[in-house]
């Protein structure tokens, strides 16, 4: 899943972060200065990239990835290594 998240565009990541936080499409559009249709296109692209068929599944995939990232970060911190790469929620 982490590999698939890395394939998201920056904008798809922005939209996805807001979607899983429960923000409406219209509110996301207003926040990002986009049309609601553009937000829906980014949501659709995210779902296709992650292999999800609905918002619930998309949220579960995001949470699973966030959990994996927290575990990796804890392991790296315990071994004294710094984390690098895309920041995930959590």
Image (tube, rainbow, N blue to C red):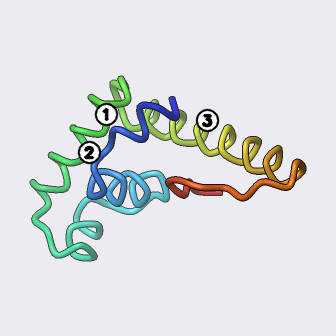
State the image quarter where residue 26 is shown.
Answer: bottom left
Task: Identify the residue position indicated by label 2 in the image.
Answer: 43
Q: Are marks 3 and 2 in contact (CB under 8 Å)?
A: no
Q: CA distance from mark 3 to mark 2?
A: 18 Å
Looking at the image, which residue is at 61% across and 35% down? 64
Q: Are marks 3 and 1 in contact (CB under 8 Å)?
A: no
Q: Are marks 2 and 1 in contact (CB under 8 Å)?
A: yes
Where residue 19 sits in the image (x, y, percent)? 39, 54
Return the disc, 3 or 2, that comes first in the chain's sequence. 2
State the image quarter where residue 67 is shown.
Answer: top right
Q: Nearer the viewer, residue 78 or 35?
A: 78
Q: Nearer the viewer, residue 81 or 89?
A: 81
Q: CA distance from mark 3 to mark 1?
A: 15 Å
Looking at the image, which residue is at 22% across and 38% down? 45
Q: How many marks?
A: 3
Looking at the image, which residue is at 28% across and 76% down? 31
Return the disc, 3 or 1, that comes first in the chain's sequence. 1
Q: Residues within 10 Å of mark 2 (few under 14, many from 20)?
A: many
Q: Nearer the viewer, residue 51 or 77?
A: 77
Q: Secondary structure at mark 1?
A: helix
Task: Identify the residue position indicated by label 1 in the image.
Answer: 47
Q: Secondary structure at mark 2?
A: helix
Where residue 54 sits in the image (x, y, percent)? 35, 31
Query: Quick one: quadrant of the C terminus?
Result: bottom right
Position of 82 compared to 61: left or right? right
Looking at the image, which residue is at 31% across and 33% down? 47
Position of 41 compared to 31: left or right? left
Position of 15 compared to 58: left or right? left
Task: Identify the residue position indicated by label 3 in the image.
Answer: 64
Q: Secondary structure at mark 3?
A: helix
């Amino acid at each position: 899943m982490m590999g698939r998240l890395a394939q998201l565009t920056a904008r798809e990541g922005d939209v996805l972060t807001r979607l899983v936080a429960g923000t409406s499409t219209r509110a996301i559009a207003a926040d990002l200065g986009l049309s609601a249709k553009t937000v829906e296109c980014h949501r659709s692209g995210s779902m296709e990239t992650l292999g999800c068929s609905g918002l619930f599944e998309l949220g579960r995939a995001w949470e699973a990835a966030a959990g994996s990232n927290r575990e990796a970060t804890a392991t790296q911190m315990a071994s004294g290594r710094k984390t690098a790469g895309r920041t995930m929620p959590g």
